[in-house]
Each structure stands twice: as C-alpha cells, then as structure tokens.
Amino acid sequence: MHLLEKYKNVPRATRQRHSWSVMSLPARWECIDLFGCEYKNCPEKAALLEIQQARKKGTRDPVLEDRLFRWGAEARICSSCKYVSYCGRDCQTADWQNHKAKCKEETAKGKDEEI
C-alpha cells in the first residue's frame, strides 16, 4: 500500500493536529474555529477568538502565540472514535451528550481501517 493511501486512514483528529503544528502563525489565527476543541462552548477557544478580534495585524505577542499554538497542538482525540479532538478532559466530558451518537458511528467505521 502506498504511503498516501495509508495517510487517508489516519484518524481525522490526528490529521488536524498535524496540520495545526505545521501551519504558519497567521494561518493558525485564521483557523481557530476549525481546529483544536470540538466543544462549542470551550472557554479557551472563546478566549482565543476574542483575542483574535482585538489583535492588530503586524504586532506580535510571544505569550499569546505560544498559548494559541499549545491549545491546538495539545488537543487530545476521543480515545474511542478517534474522530474529534478536545483541548482537555473538561471539554470532552461537557460535550459527551452531543458527541455520543457520532462517536458510536465513527467507532464502527474505524474498526475496519488499517493504519
């Protein structure tokens, strides 16, 4: 099997985390809503979106940049379905009722995949 064909079988959340780590800083700021935590009410994601709105292009803040990078890079995938990622256990627990049905569906699909 070719390497690219195997890459198609890598769980979605793992591909997202890898994409986040190789993305440029401006791209990370632009893609906050697409990466990181699946929980819609994630407090860290909300804080980063507020910072994004207030920040001025061309100015840099290493502390905020590090916070942004860690938030996306340290996201953990659901250990059952490996389809979604969360920034931490609190968000994963809070989102469980919303994720439960999708989790069962994706877990069933993933049983046949070879990585």
Image (cartoon, rainbow, N blue to C red):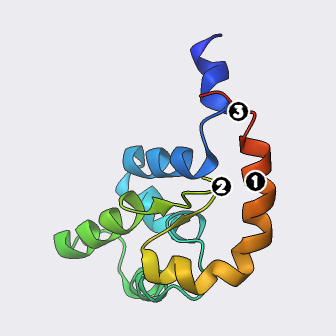
Residue at 81% across / 57% down in the picture? 105
| Residue 64: percent from left, percent from top | 26, 75
State the separation of the CA atoms marked 1 and 2: 5 Å
Mark 1 or mark 2, which has the lower sequence index? 2
Residue annotated with mark 2: 81
| Residue 32: percent from left, percent from top | 51, 69
Mark 3 or mark 1, which has the lower sequence index? 1
- Residue nearest the observer in this picture, 33 or 78: 78
Residue at 36% across / 57% down in the picture? 25
> Which residue appears farthest toward the left when viewing the image?
62
- Residue nearest the observer in this picture, 73 or 95: 95
Left/right of residue 108 with respect to residue 47 in the rendered view: right
CB-based contact (under 8 Å), mark 1 and mark 2: yes
Residue at 30% across / 68% down in the picture? 58
Mark 3 or mark 2, which has the lower sequence index? 2
Residue annotated with mark 3: 113
Hey, what amino acid is under mark 2?
Cys
Left/right of residue 55 with respect to residue 50 in the rendered view: left
> Which residue appears farthest toward the top when viewing the image?
1
Hey, what amino acid is under mark 3?
Glu
